[in-house]
Image: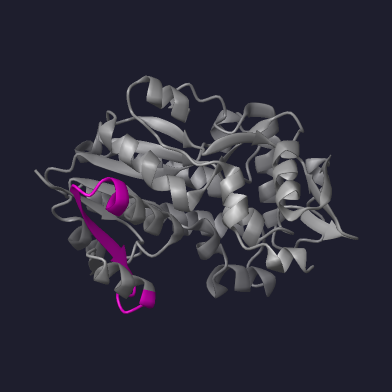
Amino acid sequence: MTKLLVVVSATGNQGAAVIKYFQQYAPSYKLRGTTRNPSSDAAIALANSGIEIVKADVNDVDSMKTAFQGADAIFAYTTFSGIMQTPEIMGKVVAGELPPPVGQYAFDVEVQQGKNMADAAATVTGLERLVWSSLSSVKKWSKGKYTQAFHFDSKEVVKDYMNFLEPLKGKVSCLQMGCFADNMVTMPERFGLTKANGELRWAMPMTRKDKLPWIDVERDTGAFVKALLDAPGGTQVVGASEYLDSPEYVKLLCDHLGVTGTYAEVPWNGTVQDDPTGFKLEIAQVYAYVNEFGYDGGDPEVMTADELEQRGYKVPRSKIADHIKRSNWSHFVAA
């Protein structure tokens, strides 16, 4: 029997990646994608490839209820950075109309969007699985030591709400997305990657020895979602294509670009100056948390892809070197 997978925000990075993977490797699923703008080029391209496209907005719970009807499975996610960068939030903080930190306002919006999707999913008769793109709770697992990691904590609040709803009990699985490899390409300076006099330098408040979970969003998100649809409800896994420490990543990038480079560990509280928005502090607290407690905070219910495979659920994964090779670094090389 053909099952229907509904993918939220089908034209976004995660949504598009899931759809592409299922088209190629799980064609038995019928796919429906939601979008705010079905007339966009990306939405039209998906429709032309055979995907059912439905207009829906995560800020409008009724539209999500309509989009979810008949679903056997749902992949849901939010985009914190997109919320944060809006004129209503970032614009007002920069203008002094709202006090920092900017993340607290994006937190409120993201949590409400997640609750809207949960409420909509709870109305679906016959729903088998809701896969939520999540992150660990920094505030919870640091026992209140770090309280400014809004884009992590918001997703945990949504997860708890999903599990609280009676119709969703036992149906919610979580994909704790690793470090987006794309961020190093699209926002190198924000993540401490610079180039001067032909030499690459990556300076971050991350210890040299700690291996980070890197994910190639385009290639591997869909594989994790498919595994979570196959695995029992309640499964939680870190979405990592590969675990690399910081010097290992620098070496891969330098080898590809044909340059020399170094990694420098800097104090996390030394990276927050000259930021009226408070977002640098948010990022710095995430680094401090990962250094001290690990990416998943030591949550015993969260497993790695290898552990998931040991339970019989395959997760094909890419190499980060392949992501580096196919990415466009021209803007960075020219800097």
Horizontal side of 329 relative to 315 (left or right) equals right
Q: Which residues are magenta?
A: 22-41
Quadrant in which the C terminus is drawn:
bottom right
Give residue 151's position: percent from left, percent from top: 55, 49
| Residue 296 vertical position relative to residue 321 in the rendered view, above or below | above
Q: In which quarter of the view is residue 162 placed?
A: top left
Q: Name the foreground residue: 320 vs 17.
A: 320
The answer to whether residue 63 is magenta is no
Nearest to the observer: residue 167 or residue 71: 71
User: Residue 34: within the magenta?
Assistant: yes
Taking the view exactly as shown, the residue that stands out farthest to the left is 1
The image quarter containing residue 332 is bottom right
Tell which of 120 and 332 is nearer to you: 332
The outermost residue toward the right is 197
Which one is nearer the viewer's eye here, 166 or 32? 32
Q: Residue at x 72, y 39 (%)?
A: 246
Q: Position of residue 134 (x, y in %)?
A: 45, 43
Q: Quadrant of residue 38?
A: bottom left
- Is 317 left, or right, of 9 in this rendering? right
